[in-house]
Image: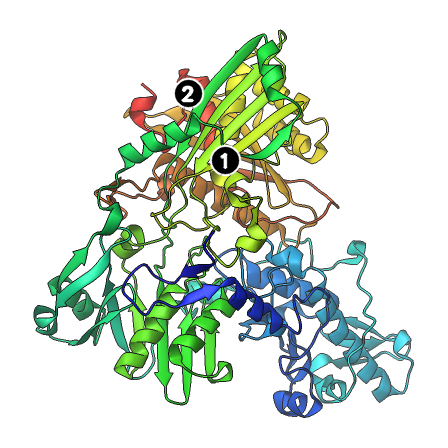
C-alpha cells in the first residue's frame, strides 16, 4: 500500500502529502481530534487577544458567534456553502439557542484555524453529508453560551437575579418590571464576562426556529449578484492562467515551444509547472488562445492504449474470480446449492465527472511576506497546508479565504489540493497575483472521476420465492488506498467506500457474502456525491427488483417482508408507496418503480413514474420521495436537497458517462456530457418522516435510489431490464 498521495501526475517537483502530514494537522487541534464541544477562541482565548478582536464593540463569546452593537448576529461558519444550505442550517443552530432575531442573523466563512476543525475529521472540511448533525450540539452550545452571557449582563445592569430574566427575539426581558434590552446594547458588558462552562440546551419541543421551514440566508445575494464565488474574485494586478495538461492519464511533459503562445496579444508568460504547462495572460481569452497555440510534446505513458471496451472485459474477467471478503454471513455456498431457483446478473456503472456549474478555480497572491488564497474549497485545512508549503512561508503568513462554491459534490476537496497548488506555484513564479481557471473541457477531460464499477450477483430462492442466499462481487478502483485517509477508510485491505451500501445490506437475508476486487489504477478517481452508494444502490435495488419478479412477488411487498428488522427503511418504503399510489394503475403509457437505500444515516425511498417518448427515450414524470433523516433543522432545506439529489442522480442515470479511447477521455463538454434540462425535470414530492432517531445526512442521500427506481419502472413498462448505465434508447426497444 502506498504511503502518500501525490498532488499531480506531471513533471518533477511534486509534493507528497503523507499520513504523517495528516496526523500533524490533527495535532494542531491541541493534541488530536476535537471530540468535545468546547467553544474556544481562534487564538486560544487569551484575554488581550479577545479584547483586540472585539475592539470594545463586538461581543465575541466564542469562535462561532459575534454580536454587534446594532444587534446584528454573525455566525462564523466552519463548513463550506456549495448550494446544500449549510450556512442556513448552521446559523439556525446558533440562533435557536441564542434566541436571536432571525432577520438580523448573518453568516461569514471561518478562517482556517484548528478551533474550526470538523469534530469527526480533525480538520476543517465539508463532506460526507454530516455538516448539520456533526455541529448539532457544538453550535447550539455556542449560541446558548452567548445568550447566557447577554442575559447575565442585563441582570447585572438591572440588579436582578438572572433567573428572573429571559431572552426573546434578540432582546433580554425582565417580565416582572417590564424592562427590556436589545442585544446590541449589552455587547460591551457581556464582553467582560467569563464564558460559562455548564451550558444546558433547549428541549426540542421548545424550538422556535429549528424544524420550521426557513428561507435560506444566501438566496438574496445569489439572486442579486452580490455573492462572491471563486470565479468572481479579482485583485489588483491579477493575471489569468490556463494549464495545458497531459492528454492521456499518467502522461508527462517532454518538451514545449512557447513562441507561438507568446505571440498572442496579452500573453505574459509560459512556464512548466507540476502537471503541465501554464499560459499566463492579462485575461481568460488570451490565456485560452495562448494555450491553443502552445506547441507541446507529451509522453503518453503506460496508459496510452487504455480504452473502455478492453477495460470492461478486464472487469468482467475479475468478477469471475474470488475477491477479498468484505462480508460473510452464514454459508452462501450451501444455501445456493439447496436453492429451488438461482438467479445471476451483472450490473455496470461508468466513470462520472462531477461537472459542477462552476469549474475549478483559484486565486493566489504570493508575496515575500505573505500569501492570500481565494477559492471555493471543501478542504480548508489541507488547502492551507498546500499553500504554506508551496509559498515557502509560515502558516500564520498564509490566509485562505473560502468563497461560495458553485457546486462541489466532492470535487473541491481532495488531498492533492490541485487548484491551490497550481495557483500558488504560478503566483510565486511570476511574482504577481494569478487566477487559475479550469475550462469546462479541462473539467471533463482532466478531472478526477467517480470510479467505474461492476457488480456480479448470484442469489438463491426457495420454492416460495423467498431469498435464501445473496452473493455480490464488486469490481472497482479504490478511492482511498494510497491516500492519507487510508488508515481511516481501509479495513483489512478493503476500501470501505468501494463496498458501502453492500456490506451494510439491511435486507433480512440469512446468507450474505460480499467480495471486492480492486481494479487496476491509472484513471484518477475520487469521492463523488454519495460515493460508493451511488453505484451500489443502482445494482442492489435493480437486482432486487429482478428477484421480486423471478419469485412472483410485488417489489414493494418483497422489500417490506425483508425489512422487518429495519423499521426506518420499511417506514419510508411504505410512505413512498402510499403517496405514489402504488397498486393503483398509473396513467396510460406509464409505469412505476421503487427503490430504497440508506446513505450516511438517512433512509430514502423513491417511486419513479416513467413513460417512453416517441423518440424512444425514457421520460420521468414524477418522483415521490420519502426520507427519514432524524431531527430536521430546516424542512425547506431537506426538500431542496431531495430535489437536487434526484436531478443530479437522473442526470447520471440518463446521460452520465466518461469513456476512454487511447488513454484519453472521449467527452469534452455539455454537448456530449449533457445535464438534465429543466424541461426534463420531474415533479418531485417529498415526504419527511417525523423522527427522533439519530440525525443523518441530507446533501447526498437522494442520489442513490433514483437510478434504480427509474430502471425498475422502465422494466415494468417495457419488460426490458436495465443493467448498465446510462440508460440508452436501444436498450428499451
Mark 2 against mark 1, which lies toward the viewer? 1
The front one of 93 and 375 is 375
- Residue at x 49% of width, y 32% of height: 323
Q: Residues within 10 Å of mark 1 (few under 14, many from 20)?
A: many
- Residue at x 29% of width, y 75% of height: 426
In the image, taking residue 304 as reference, residue 492 lies left or right, namely right
In three-dimensional space, the C-alpha distance between marks 2 and 1, rounded to whole angstroms, equals: 24 Å
Q: Position of residue 587 (x, y in %)?
A: 47, 21
In the image, taking residue 660 as reference, residue 101 lies left or right, namely right
**Res 564 → quadrant:** top right
- Residue at x 31% of width, y 72% of height: 435
Q: Earlier in the sequence, mark 2 or mark 1?
A: 1
The front one of 176 and 132 is 132
In the displayed structure, would residue 60 be above or below residue 220?
below
Q: Is residue 216 visible?
A: no
* Disc on res. 721: 2
Q: Position of residue 489 (x, y in %)?
A: 56, 50
Q: Which residue is mark 1?
A: 516
In the displayed structure, would residue 18 be above or below residue 535?
below
Q: Position of residue 66 (x, y in %)?
A: 64, 78
- Residue at x 60% of width, y 68% of height: 26
The quadrant of the rendering that contains the C terminus is top left
In the displayed structure, would residue 342 be above or below residue 429?
above
In the image, taking residue 391 as reference, residue 472 lies left or right, namely right
Colour scheme shown: rainbow
Q: Is residue 347 visible?
A: yes
At mark 1, the secondary structure is strand
Amino acid at each position: 500500500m502506498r504511503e502518500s498521495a501525490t498532488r499531480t501526475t506531471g513533471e518533477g517537483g511534486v509534493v507528497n502529502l503523507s499520513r504523517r502530514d495528516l496526523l500533524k494537522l490533527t495535532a494542531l487541534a491541541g493534541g488530536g481530534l476535537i471530540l468535545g464541544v468546547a467553544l474556544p477562541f481562534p487564538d486560544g482565548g487569551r484575554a488581550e487577544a479577545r479584547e483586540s478582536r472585539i475592539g470594545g464593540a463586538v461581543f465575541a463569546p466564542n469562535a462561532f458567534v459575534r454580536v454587534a452593537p446594532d444587534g446584528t448576529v454573525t455566525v462564523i461558519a466552519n463548513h463550506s456553502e456549495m448550494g446544500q444550505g449549510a450556512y442556513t442550517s448552521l446559523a439556525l443552530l446558533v440562533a435557536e439557542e441564542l434566541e436571536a432575531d432571525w432577520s438580523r442573523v448573518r453568516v461569514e466563512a471561518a478562517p482556517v484555524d484548528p478551533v474550526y476543525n470538523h469534530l469527526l475529521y480533525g480538520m476543517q472540511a465539508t463532506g460526507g453529508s454530516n455538516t448539520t448533525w456533526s455541529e448539532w450540539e457544538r453550535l447550539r452550545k455556542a449560541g446558548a453560551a452567548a445568550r447566557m452571557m447577554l442575559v447575565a449582563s442585563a441582570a447585572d445592569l438591572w440588579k436582578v437575579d438572572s433567573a428572573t430574566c429571559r431572552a426573546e427575539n434578540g432582546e433580554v426581558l425582565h417580565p416582572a418590571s417590564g424592562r427590556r434590552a436589545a442585544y446590541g446594547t449589552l455587547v460591551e458588558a457581556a464582553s467582560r464576562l467569563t464564558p460559562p462552562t455548564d451550558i444546558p440546551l433547549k428541549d426540542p419541543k421548545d424550538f422556535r426556529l429549528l424544524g420550521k421551514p426557513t428561507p435560506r440566508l444566501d438566496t438574496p445575494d445569489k439572486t442579486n449578484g452580490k455573492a462572491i464565488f471563486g470565479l468572481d474574485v479579482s485583485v489588483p494586478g491579477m493575471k489569468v492562467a490556463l494549464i495545458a495538461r497531459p492528454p492521456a492519464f499518467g502522461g508527462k511533459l517532454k518538451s514545449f515551444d512557447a513562441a507561438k503562445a507568446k505571440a498572442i496579444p496579452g500573453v505574459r508568460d509560459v512556464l512548466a509547472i507540476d502537471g503541465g504547462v501554464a499560459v499566463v495572460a492579462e485575461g481568460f481569452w488570451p490565456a485560452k488562445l495562448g494555450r491553443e497555440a502552445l506547441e507541446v510534446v507529451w509522453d503518453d505513458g503506460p496508459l496510452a492504449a487504455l480504452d473502455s471496451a478492453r477495460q470492461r472485459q478486464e472487469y468482467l474477467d475479475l468478477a469471475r474470480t474470488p475477491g477479498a471478503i468484505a462480508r460473510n454471513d452464514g454459508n452462501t455456498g450451501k444455501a445456493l446449492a439447496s436453492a429451488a431457483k438461482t438467479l445471476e446478473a451483472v450490473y455496470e456503472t461508468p466513470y462520472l465527472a462531477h461537472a459542477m456549474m462552476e469549474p475549478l478555480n483559484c486565486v493566489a497572491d504570493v508575496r515575500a511576506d505573505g500569501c492570500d488564497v481565494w477559492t471555493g474549497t471543501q478542504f480548508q485545512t489541507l488547502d492551507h497546508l498546500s499553500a504554506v508549503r508551496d509559498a515557502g512561508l509560515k502558516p500564520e503568513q498564509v490566509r485562505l479565504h473560502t468563497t461560495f462554491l458553485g457546486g462541489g459534490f466532492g470535487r473541491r476537496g481532495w488531498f492533492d489540493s490541485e487548484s491551490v497548488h497550481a495557483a500558488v506555484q504560478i503566483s510565486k513564479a511570476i511574482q504577481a497575483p494569478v487566477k487559475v481557471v479550469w475550462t469546462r473541457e479541462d473539467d471533463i477531460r482532466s478531472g478526477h472521476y467517480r470510479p467505474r464499477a461492476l457488480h456480479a450477483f448470484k442469489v438463491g430462492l426457495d420454492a416460495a420465492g423467498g431469498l435464501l442466499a445473496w452473493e455480490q462481487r464488486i469490481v472497482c478502483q479504490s478511492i482511498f488506498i494510497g491516500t492519507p485517509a487510508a488508515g481511516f477508510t481501509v479495513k483489512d485491505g478493503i476500501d470501505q467506500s468501494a463496498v458501502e451500501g453492500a456490506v451494510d445490506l439491511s435486507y433480512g437475508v440469512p446468507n450474505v457474502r460480499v467480495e471486492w476486487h480492486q481494479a487496476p489504477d491509472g484513471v484518477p478517481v475520487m469521492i463523488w456525491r454519495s460515493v460508493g452508494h451511488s453505484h451500489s444502490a443502482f445494482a442492489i435495488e435493480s437486482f432486487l427488483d429482478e428477484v421480486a419478479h423471478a419469485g412472483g412477488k410485488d417489489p414493494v411487498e418483497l422489500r417490506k417482508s425483508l425489512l422487518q428488522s429495519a423499521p426506518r427503511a420499511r417506514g419510508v418504503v411504505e410512505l413512498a408507496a402510499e403517496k405514489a399510489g402504488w397498486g393503483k394503475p398509473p396513467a396510460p403509457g406509464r409505469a412505476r418503480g421503487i427503490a430504497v437505500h440508506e446513505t450516511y444515516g438517512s433512509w430514502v425511498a423513491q417511486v419513479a413514474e416513467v413513460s417512453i417518448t416517441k423518440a424512444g427515450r425514457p421520460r420521468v414524470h414524477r418522483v415521490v420521495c420519502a426520507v427519514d433523516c432524524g431531527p430536521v433543522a430546516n424542512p425547506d432545506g431537506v426538500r431542496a436537497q431531495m430535489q437536487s439529489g434526484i436531478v443530479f442522480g437522473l442526470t447520471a442515470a440518463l446521460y452520465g458517462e466518461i469513456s476512454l479511447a487511447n488513454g484519453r477521455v472521449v467527452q469534452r463538454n455539455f454537448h456530449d456530457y449533457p445535464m438534465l434540462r429543466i424541461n426534463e425535470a420531474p415533479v418531485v414530492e417529498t415526504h419527511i418522516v417525523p423522527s427522533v432517531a439519530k440525525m443523518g445526512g441530507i446533501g447526498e442521500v437522494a442520489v442513490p435510489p433514483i437510478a434504480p427506481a427509474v430502471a425498475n419502472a422502465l422494466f415494468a413498462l417495457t419488460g426490458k431490464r436495465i443493467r448498465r448505465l446510462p440508460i440508452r434508447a436501444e436498450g428499451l426497444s
